[in-house]
Image (cartoon, rainbow, N blue to C red):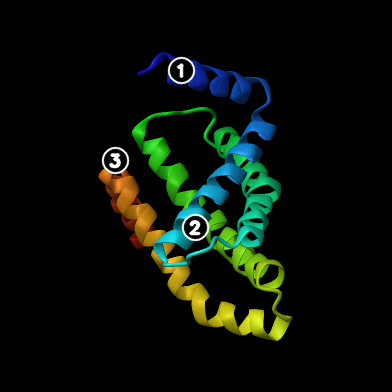
Amino acid sequence: MSEIAKRGWQSYTHQLQSHPLRTKAITSAVLAGVSDSAAQKISGIQKLHRKRILLKMMFGFLYYGPFGHYLHKTLDRIFKGKKDKKTVAKKVLLEQVTSSPWNNMVFLMYYGFVVEGRPWPQVKNKIKKEYPKLQLTSWMGNIYESSSKDCGLNQVMDEFDGQIEGY
């Protein structure tokens, strides 16, 4: 790793330790801006929609960063700091069942109201149409990602299925 990158990473991790909420909010805003810029370019938009980028950055800063910070603090309390593969898989599963649906719904509402400026009936119709596919895609992508990292998700799912069958 280059010296500049190493110092940058050390500075970032220091800020993460010293000011976790602020650092996560800023990181979320930056990632939202970069990902939306890339998405616009990939979709063929010639001139970036700066307002859209800024509104998504604001969402990352005000919602995703803080929400993720407190969610993971709560998960750490629930699982009392355990870090083994099985616990990580349980955290992923709990997060996907609870916060993923909520976050996707909140984002669709924010995007419809704030970014696109649509009235509630249009936002509601768009959510009815797009939410199920969005959530399924979110789950499938996260399950694939988690299982490909060999964190034991398949084993946890097998145990979970066994527990359900016992009822």
Residue 98 is situated, as x and y percent measured from the top left of the image, at 55, 56
Q: Of tags 1 and 3, which is closer to the observer?
A: 1
Label ID, residue 162: none
Q: Earlier in the sequence, mark 2 or mark 1?
A: 1
Q: According to the image, label 2 marks what residue?
A: 97
Residue for point 42% across, 13% down: 3
Whether residue 109 sits left or right of residue 131 in the image: it is right
Looking at the rendered structure, the secondary structure element under dot 2 is helix
Q: Of tags 2 and 1, which is closer to the observer?
A: 1
Front residue (pair 19, 32): 32
Q: According to the image, label 1 marks what residue?
A: 4
Looking at the rendered structure, the secondary structure element under dot 1 is helix
Q: Amino acid at mark 1?
A: Ile
Does 99 sit above or below residue 105?
A: above
Residue for point 49% across, 57% down: 97
Q: According to the image, label 3 marks what residue?
A: 149
Q: Amino acid at mark 3?
A: Lys
Q: Earlier in the sequence, mark 3 or mark 2?
A: 2
Where is the C terminus found, in terms of image quarters?
bottom left
Front residue (pair 73, 39): 39
Mark 3 packing: few (<14 Cα in 10 Å), some, or many (20+)? few
Looking at the rendered structure, the secondary structure element under dot 3 is loop
Front residue (pair 159, 77): 77
Q: Amino acid at mark 2?
A: Val
